[in-house]
Image (cartoon, rainbow, N blue to C red):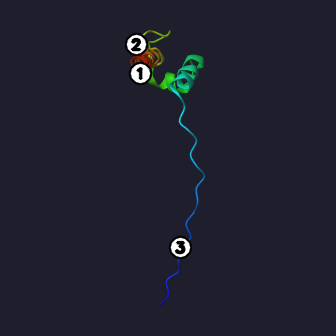
Amino acid sequence: MTSKAKKRVVLPTRPDPPSTEQILEDVQRAQPNDPVFVLLAEPSEGNRSPLSPRGLFTRLASQNQERHEE
């Protein structure tokens, strides 16, 4: 019996993850009807409040960035 050597597949390198600034920019530019926010929002929610997923993420990301700058 012979065993054949398996060829290793070389994968492309992964891109760098987005920076906090890039994530914040994406979230701030997102439309209120963006599927991510529509799926997470409560049905009665008509506008963005500080507790909406978008407002909450923006607030937490800003606080995180401030902590790292200190």
Question: Going 40% across and 13% down the picture, which residue do you hit?
Answer: 51
Which SS class for mark 2?
loop
Question: Which of the 4 image quarters holds residue 57?
Answer: top left
Is residue 66 visible from the viewing direction of this image?
yes
What separation in Å lies between label 1 and label 2 (alpha carbons)? Answer: 23 Å
What kind of residue is marked 3? Lys
Q: Position of residue 61 (x, y in %)?
A: 44, 20
What kind of residue is marked 1? His
Q: Name the residue under label 3.
A: 6
Residue 68's disc is 1
What kind of residue is marked 2? Leu
* Label 1: few (<14), some (14–19) or many (≥20) C-alpha neighbours in 10 Å: few
What separation in Å lies between label 3 and label 2 (alpha carbons)? Answer: 52 Å
Question: Going 50% across and 87% down the picture, which residue do you hit?
Answer: 2
Which SS class for mark 1?
helix
* Label 2: few (<14), some (14–19) or many (≥20) C-alpha neighbours in 10 Å: few
